[in-house]
Image (tube, grey):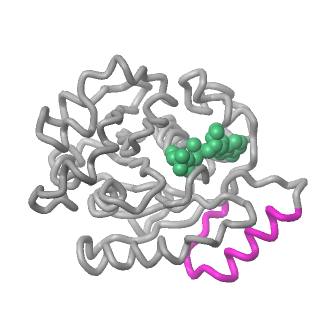
């Protein structure tokens, strides 16, 4: 049975999508069958994988609404071993669209129930909010990876995130675990980056990945070419970091079923 990992942090611009795209791609490169699901109305993961949002027939929104089944929205093997369910702008209306839907926190879980056994990993890119889309992602997930940007305000909002995760654990998904925290955009020339890492380590009682993702311009460029970092610049420091993170995620025996 595959592991479903939600990449979540309600703070914007911390590296959720960069981590989703490149962790998914590096897990696929290592031979795992991977499905990446874009739950963000911004659709950055969709376009980062080179998919034109205007060309999509069905998105994760359509499957959640029952307009189509998941198979119809699935873009199979966009890259080797890596399939994608794209997002569309309509997701932005989910809060209202699903207001009266029965078990509205479980829509995504039900949607992907039948296909999870086909994949080793399902990676869900969450939007920068703690609304219905993130709640659905966390309810469907086995574990959560929290990217933290190495900047001054890194700790702000984390307690709210941990509180939400605990609440979801209590009320909606008993088995949910925080798989780990990963630092992103680390700048070794900047003392602040190391201070943030130390500060979070001292204040957050969570597993922290040894891999620290450096600030790397190739990681910022890759989405505009529609390629994950391992295919855009295989030898960049960004590609090395996400390969190491993929190794750590694969070794995380605690979560293997
Ligand atoms: N390690 C890195 N090095 C350099 N640039 C990075 C790195 N990680 C992310 N970025 C850049 O920082 C910006 C924000 O990253 P990203 O889109 O992954 O964050 P996000 O948390 O998904 O944002 P949002 O909350 O809007 O969904 C993007 O322009 C991205 O290219
Ligand atoms: Mg994003």
Instruction: Please indicate, yes or no, whether residue 98 appears anywhere in the rendered image.
Output: yes
Q: Position of residue 204 (x, y in %)?
A: 60, 79
Where is 16 relative to 165, above or below? above
Give the main secondary structure, helix, strand or loop, of the magenta stretch: helix
Depth order, front residue of 217/233: 217
The answer to whether 242 appears left or right of 252 in the picture is right
Quarter of the image for the N terminus: give it: bottom left
Q: Is residue 199 magenta?
A: yes
Q: Residue furthest front?
A: 96
The part of the image, by quadrant, that contains residue 257 is bottom left
**Relative image position of residue 70 (x, y in whole percent):** 19, 36
Q: Which residue appears at 13% of the width and 62% of the height?
A: 103
Q: Residue at x 18, y 57 (%)?
A: 99
With respect to residue 68, does 27 lie above or below? Answer: below
Bounds of the magenta span?
A: 191-210
Please say if 191 is above or below 220.
below
Q: Position of residue 89 (x, y in %)?
A: 35, 35
Q: Position of residue 113 (x, y in %)?
A: 17, 51
């Amino acid at each position: 049975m595959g592991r479903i990992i939600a990449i979540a942090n309600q703070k914007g611009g911390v590296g959720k999508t960069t981590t989703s795209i490149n962790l998914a791609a590096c897990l696929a490169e290592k031979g795992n069958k991977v499905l990446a699901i874009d739950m963000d109305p911004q659709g950055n993961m969709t376009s980062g994988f080179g998919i034109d949002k205007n060309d999509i027939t069905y998105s994760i929104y359509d499957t959640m609404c029952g307009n189509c089944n998941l198979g119809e929205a699935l873009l199979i093997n966009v890259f080797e071993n890596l399939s994608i369910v794209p997002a569309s702008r309509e997701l932005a209306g989910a809060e209202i669209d699903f207001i009266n839907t029965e078990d509205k926190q479980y829509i995504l879980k039900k949607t992907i129930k039948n296909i999870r056994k086909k994949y080793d990993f399902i990676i869900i890119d969450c939007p920068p909010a703690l609304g219905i889309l993130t709640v659905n992602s966390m309810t469907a997930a086995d574990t959560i990876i929290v990217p933290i940007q190495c900047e001054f305000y890194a700790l702000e909002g984390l307690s709210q995130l941990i509180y939400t995760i605990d609440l979801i654990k209590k009320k909606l998904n008993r088995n949910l675990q925080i798989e780990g925290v990963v630092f992103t955009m680390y700048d070794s020339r900047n003392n602040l980056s190391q201070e943030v890492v130390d500060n979070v380590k001292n204040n957050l009682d969570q597993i922290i990945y040894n891999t620290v993702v450096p600030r790397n311009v190739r990681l910022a460029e890759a989405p505009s070419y529609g390629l994950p970092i391992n295919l855009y610049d295989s030898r960049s420091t960004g590609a090395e970091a996400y390969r190491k993170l993929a190794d750590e995620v694969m070794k995380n025996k605690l979560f293997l079923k």
